[in-house]
Image (cartoon, coloured by chain):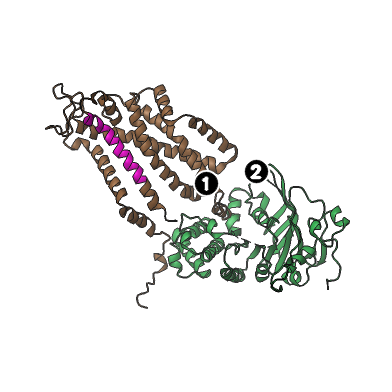
């Protein structure tokens, strides 16, 4: 078995403030080298917080983090100073949701890519610029030498996201975190960016954690899917297993709620209710109030994972040993 | 195609040559700004090169030639109440007036930006301490504050510089803090941290790069206020002391002559008016020329 690239154990994140928010509750997750995992879940389920924890981007004064995070064997929580700086961007980098906000408007895109390359690779300016040029070619930006001199506002949304990807990959990280990289783009551009990310992942052989709320996107890019609900993972497995054999009622609800097989005028299959407020620690299954199968036992305690196979697990007490249908 | 330029990698730059030339082009096309710029440049140049312009001695008075009207032979703009040449005094006066009018804003720009950026980026307790201290100064109208500090320190050029600098630090700090905390919340600051930049690099490159131009534009709009305040301090006798030529002071001393020759007495005021108007219009013009995003 290959070394785990990412190994998160019993991660709990709480935000303190006027009220405490239990953003992540006892989350464990692992990723192998070169694997693509989609973190699937609705807004507020803790996907982005998980990514930010991995990069230590959460405000230290307001957040309490427990548990263990190892990336490529290093304990992320223990990093500081120079080690943290070379870890961020060198080992792990991130593609943000809205490239219009994540690129600095007062610098040319070439300067921004070169800046990151000079920082991590210790290259001279000319070399860094030629690396930036090379990266822009790899993300298939037309006339890259001209684009180097462009400001972010002069580029279209899709082009900006390509630049963002070039920036994230310029230092050849082992792990790429993608925080809904296609949400801010329109549908035709989305698919191009997804295909690009998939190609680059194969080319560079890096691990990718891809956060999305769109099950279609998750299926498109990832080999494995972890479904998150209310700050914890409720089901994990290969993309094939999750799509064809969902076990958790929430996952089933998500799959049933897709629009493709619905005739016009028919009522959409939505999951009734809304996700819980995360202001107190969960005392039972967080999904129980919305679950058609829930019983008293579900509310009594947080369900443990049922292992259905190697790296296939589901946190539900009602899961049947045999596949449904 | 033979015309397609195949520049080697060595020729690739990340510099955007179009930006500053674009700003310059927009400025040149703006007649109001260009006129203001010309007037200001002429004023500044004449103030700097005053000793070489062949003017009369601004300190040398004459008991016989007092309060000569504008257009008198030998005194193009007449003479003041002590018979000193007005043209020379106005041009020499520009040296002190412009210096006292601009220096405090320059100093306050540096000090206020540093304070505001620290407060905005650090947040929390640091922010509270800096901003609440700054708020204390906001409790007083700026004129009153300048007079109070100058009065306490005593008259003199250095003291007026100090008091005016103190007056302009709070508003600049306010603006710097507001802009910085706005920028800090943006994704690209997180993105810079996520790509491994040190806190200092994040501030130096990404925060300052984004906040400096709004603070700068705001500061330029304060220069005219500062000039008027400086002139006001001299007018009240707690700024520049006679016999130094300074527009505010000249306005004060010529006050008594207003019934004898109102036009002559108005000249220093006219200079203050024209200069501050030009500064305001120039700052507006530069602001709109630099704004490429809209």
Please identify the quarter of the rendering in which residue A30 is found.
bottom right
The alpha-carbon separation of the residues under discs 1 and 2 comes to 19 Å
Q: Chain of mark 1?
A: B
Q: Is the residue A31 above or below the residue B202 in the image?
A: below
Foreground tag (1 vs 2): 2
Q: Looking at this view, is B28 or B55 the one in front?
A: B28
Chain A in the picture: what colour?
green
Task: Quadrant for the C terminus of chain B, please.
Answer: bottom left
Horizontal and vertical percent for residue A221?
65, 69
Q: Looking at this view, is B39 or A116 the one in front?
A: B39
Q: Chain of mark 2?
A: A
Q: Is residue B146 left or right of residue A315?
A: left
- Of all chains in the rendering, the one displayed in brown is B
Q: Magenta residues, as a range?
A: B262-283
Q: What is the number of the mark on residue A172?
A: none
User: At 37% from the left edge and 45% from the top edge, which residue is drawn?
Assistant: B283
Residue labelled with disc 2:
A61
Horizontal and vertical percent for residue A69?
70, 54
Horizontal and vertical percent for residue B15?
41, 59
């Amino acid at each position: 078995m290959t070394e785990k690239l990412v190994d998160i154990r019993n991660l709990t994140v709480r935000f303190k403030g006027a009220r405490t928010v239990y953003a992540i509750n006892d989350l464990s997750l692992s990723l192998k080298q070169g694997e693509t995992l989609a973190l699937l879940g609705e807004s507020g389920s803790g996907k982005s917080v998980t990514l930010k924890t991995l990069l230590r981007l959460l405000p230290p004064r307001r957040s309490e983090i427990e548990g263990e995070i190892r990336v490529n064997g290093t304990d992320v929580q223990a990093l500081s100073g120079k080690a943290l700086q070379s870890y961020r961007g060198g080992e792990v980098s991130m593609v943000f949701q809205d490239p219009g906000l994540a690129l600095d408007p007062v610098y040319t895109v070439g300067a921004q890519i070169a800046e990151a390359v000079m920082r991590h690779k210790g290259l001279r300016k000319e070399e860094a610029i030629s690396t930036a040029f090379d990266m822009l070619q790899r993300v298939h930006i037309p006339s890259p030498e001209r684009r180097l001199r462009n400001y972010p506002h002069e580029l279209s949304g899709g082009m900006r996201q390509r630049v963002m990807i070039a920036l994230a990959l310029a230092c050849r990280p082992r792990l790429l975190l993608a925080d809904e990289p296609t949400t801010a783009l329109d549908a035709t551009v989305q698919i191009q960016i997804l295909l690009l990310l998939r190609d680059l992942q194969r080319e560079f052989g890096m691990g990718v954690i891809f956060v999305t709320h769109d099950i279609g996107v998750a299926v498109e890019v990832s080999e494995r899917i972890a479904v998150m609900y209310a700050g914890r993972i409720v089901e994990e497995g290969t993309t094939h297993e999750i799509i064809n054999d969902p076990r958790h009622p929430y996952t089933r609800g998500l799959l049933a709620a897709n629009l493709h097989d619905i005739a016009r005028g028919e009522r959409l299959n939505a999951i009734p209710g809304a996700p819980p407020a995360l202001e107190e620690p969960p005392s039972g299954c967080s999904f129980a109030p919305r679950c058609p199968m829930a019983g008293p036992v579900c509310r009594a305690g947080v369900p443990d994972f049922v292992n259905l196979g190697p790296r296939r697990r589901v946190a539900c007490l009602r899961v049947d040993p045999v596949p449904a249908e | 195609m033979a015309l397609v330029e195949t520049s080697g990698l060595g020729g690739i730059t990340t510099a955007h040559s179009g930006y500053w030339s674009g700003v310059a082009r927009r400025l040149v096309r703006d007649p109001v700004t260009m006129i203001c710029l010309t007037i200001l440049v002429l004023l500044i140049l004449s103030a700097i090169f005053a000793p070489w312009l062949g003017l009369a001695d601004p300190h040398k008075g004459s008991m016989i030639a007092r309060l000569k009207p504008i257009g008198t032979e030998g005194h193009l703009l007449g003479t003041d109440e002590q018979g000193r040449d007005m043209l020379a005094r106005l041009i020499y006066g520009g040296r002190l007036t412009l210096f006292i009018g601009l220096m405090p804003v320059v100093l306050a720009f540096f000090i206020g930006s540093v304070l505001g950026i620290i407060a905005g980026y650090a947040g929390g307790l640091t922010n509270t301490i800096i901003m609440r201290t700054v708020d204390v100064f906001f409790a007083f109208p700026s004129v009153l504050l300048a007079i109070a500090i100058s009065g306490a320190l005593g008259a003199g050029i250095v003291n007026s510089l100090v008091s005016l600098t103190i007056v302009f630090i709070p508003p600049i700090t306010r603006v710097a803090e507001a802009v910085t905390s706005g920028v800090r919340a943006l994704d690209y600051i997180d993105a810079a941290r996520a790509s491994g930049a040190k806190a200092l690099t994040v501030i130096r490159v990404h925060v300052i790069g984004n906040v400096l131009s709004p603070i700068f534009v705001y500061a330029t709009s304060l220069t005219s206020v500062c000039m008027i305040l400086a002139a006001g301090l001299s007018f009240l006798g707690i700024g520049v002391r006679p016999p130094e030529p300074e527009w505010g002071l000249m306005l004060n001393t010529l006050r008594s002559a207003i019934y004898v020759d109102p036009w002559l007495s108005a000249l220093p005021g006219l200079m203050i008016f024209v200069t501050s108007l030009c500064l305001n219009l120039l700052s507006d013009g530069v602001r709109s020329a630099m704004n490429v995003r809209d």
